[in-house]
């Protein structure tokens, strides 16, 4: 099955953080899972590193590429269709990154691995 990772799920999985739920950990470690990380999440990580919101052991580009390779995570681009759908979503969630992930998950028919309960207010499958 295909899964879209929320940014925090990617970061926690990559760091081996115990905040990752056992269900999410099982999905991430299952070789049958097809894991995807949005280009929007890569941008979000880069912005947060640049503004001091998070620290990584490597520069963001290297960190993303190496950790994605370790887990077999593929990148999903942000298309015009995704952007337009995200802009049309109701403002149930204030975070534009998360609204974009919701739009991608809906269009690409993937559940989102996320701890963010606000995302489940949209018509999208969430797993935690």
Image: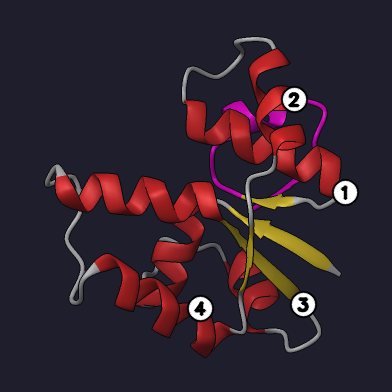
Taking the spot 16% from the left edge, 60% from the top edge, the residue there is 55
Label 1 environment density (alpha carbons within 10 Å; few <14, some 14–19, many ≥20): some
Q: Earlier in the sequence, mark 3 or mark 1?
A: 3
Taking the spot 81% from the left edge, 66% from the top edge, the residue there is 2
Mark 4 secondary-structure assignment: helix
Q: Quadrant location of the N terminus? A: bottom right
Tell me whether the residue at label 3 lies in contact with that at label 2, contact meaning CB atoms closer than 8 angstroms: no
Q: Which mark is residue 109?
A: 1
Left or right of 90 on screen, residue 68: left
State the separation of the CA atoms marked 4 and 1: 21 Å
Label 4 environment density (alpha carbons within 10 Å; few <14, some 14–19, many ≥20): some
Frontmost residue, 89 versus 33: 89
Return the residue at label 2: 85
Tell me whether the residue at label 3 lies in contact with that at label 1, contact meaning CB atoms closer than 8 angstroms: no
State the separation of the CA atoms marked 2 and 4: 26 Å
Frontmost residue, 117 versus 14: 14
Tell me whether the residue at label 4 lies in contact with that at label 3, contact meaning CB atoms closer than 8 angstroms: no
Q: Nearer the observer, disc 3 or disc 2?
A: 2
Q: Residue 54, image x and y in percent?
A: 20, 53
Q: Examine the structure image and report whether residue 66 is included in the region drawn in magenta.
A: no
Residue found farthest to the left:
52
Taking the spot 71% from the left edge, 14% from the top edge, the residue there is 88
Q: Examine the structure image and report whether residue 120 is included in the region drawn in magenta.
A: yes
State the separation of the CA atoms marked 3 and 2: 26 Å
Q: Earlier in the sequence, mark 4 or mark 3?
A: 3
Q: Earlier in the sequence, mark 2 or mark 4?
A: 4
Return the residue at label 4: 68
Q: Nearer the observer, disc 1 or disc 2?
A: 2
Magenta region: 114-128
Return the residue at label 3: 33
Label 2 environment density (alpha carbons within 10 Å; few <14, some 14–19, many ≥20): some
């Amino acid at each position: 099955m295909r899964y879209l990772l929320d940014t925090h799920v990617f970061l926690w999985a990559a760091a081996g953080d115990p905040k990752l739920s056992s269900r999410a950990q099982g999905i991430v470690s299952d070789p049958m899972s097809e894991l995807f990380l949005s280009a929007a999440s890569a941008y979000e990580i880069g912005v947060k590193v640049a503004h001091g919101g998070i620290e990584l052991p490597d520069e963001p580009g290297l960190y993303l590429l190496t950790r994605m390779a370790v887990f077999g995570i593929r990148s999903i681009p942000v298309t015009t269709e995704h952007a337009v759908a995200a802009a049309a979503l109701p403002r149930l969630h204030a975070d534009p990154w998360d609204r974009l992930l919701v739009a991608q998950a809906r269009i690409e028919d993937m559940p989102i691995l996320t701890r963010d309960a606000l995302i489940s207010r949209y018509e999208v499958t969430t797993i935690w």
